[in-house]
Amino acid sequence: MSTSPLPLSFNERQTFALVHRHKKIARTTISELTGLTATTVSRLVTRLLDLGLLEEKPDRSGQLGQPRKMLSVRSRQAYSIGVNFMRGRFDIALVDLCGRIARVDTIRIEEVTAGRIAETAAFRSTEILAQCEIDRDSVVGAGFSVPGGFSPDGETLLAHEWFPDLDRQTLAPMFSEALGMPCSTDTDGACATLGEYLYGQGVDHSTFFLLHLGHGVGGGAIIDGQLYRGAHRNASKPGVLFPYGTPRPSGQDLLTCLIEAGHDIKDIADLDRISPESDPTVIAWLDRAAQQIGELGRVITAFLDPETIIVGGRLPQTFNNALLHRLGKIELPGPSRGLPNAPFVASSLGPRSGVLGAASLPIFGTYYPGADGTTGNPYINGRRTM
């Protein structure tokens, strides 16, 4: 069975996305949520089953009578590659449609150039596929999480200052040629947001904001089931409220505080060695950052009215949890009369968020409605479907 078919239709994407997000769902429920007839749903499901994307099994969870058949995404049939890099290293992972990481490698890389990343990613992806005994035809593509934003053409990277060799380059075509498969790029915040939507805290929400704390203060927004990118793919950059040269709730700001306090630390990855509630410098930073994030939450609520605000990014999970503990104690007025601030939650993906988010790019682009330029509204007949 081929898992790399001709592009799926809108209704096929919509059906797949419903199964993907619900984990298990009956055909009748799909019909109820979408308004499609039972005959149409049956035709759509049959094709997705034939393609090997879905499977259907009886639900034997204690119900009396004939068990109802439930659809779910078929694991270990189609895969995506995710690449997430930072100073001195990058992670590459092979992920299936269910979000299961078949393999993840961390590679030390001193020369962070586009050519070096493309060459290393191509070599390692070939090795991983061979070691996992997975055919290249089962891979729908590779996603690269990149630090920075995009120029007005929406394609040329305006890289973070720590990555000058990537600045002003259009990376996706170079990566596609090197890996021999479709490759896509997006910002750290956008990739992490998709990862949360498909596999993390966002699975139960159709509208939320992700606050991505990395070298800078980034973010991403899912609005009515779609990743909002903006006119030039530069939407959702809350760091603009915290000018450079002033205290910021960013990983780079935390590193600067620790270095000034005498810590031998070079990158955010080194924070794993520190207990957030035992170091005075970290405690002071967490107290200040939580207050800044709390105020930021009021602004995000005012503009987007999200169901929740997820705190994630490159910081270790222990640091995110420490921030959430403090945010739970901060009481701030809502952005307008009678409107409460959106609640904060910590990302559930932990250290997997970078590569899982990057790998989500081709999965979302291939299998979800709206990602191919069609209009995908998860609210049909007044009910949320995704």
Image (spheres, helix red, strand yellow):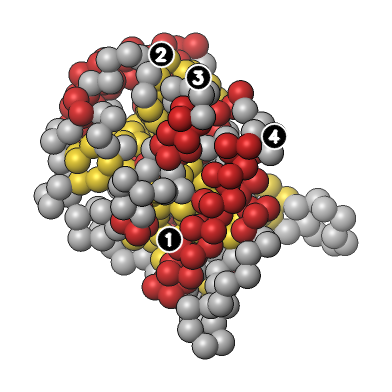
Name which residue lies at 58% across and 38% down.
Answer: 282
Q: Secondary structure at mark 2?
A: strand
Helix, strand or loop at label 3? It is loop
| Residue type for callout 2 | Arg
Q: Which mark is residue 264?
A: 3
Does dot 1 land on a helix, a strand or a loop?
strand
Asked whether, in this view, residue 207 is left or right of residue 25, the answer is left
In whole angstroms, how far apart are the C-alphas of marks 4 and 1? 35 Å
Identified by mark 3, the residue type is Asp
Which mark sits nearer the N-terminus, 3 or 1?
A: 1
Viewport quadrant of the N terminus: top left
Q: Residue at position x 54%, y 44% from top? A: 285
Q: What's the CA distance linking mark 4 and mark 3?
A: 17 Å
Q: Which residue is mark 2?
A: 108
The span from disc 3 to disc 1 (Cα, nearest Å) is 38 Å
Q: Which residue is mark 1?
A: 222
> Closer to the camera, 98 or 344?
344
In the drawing, what numbered circle is on residue 13?
none
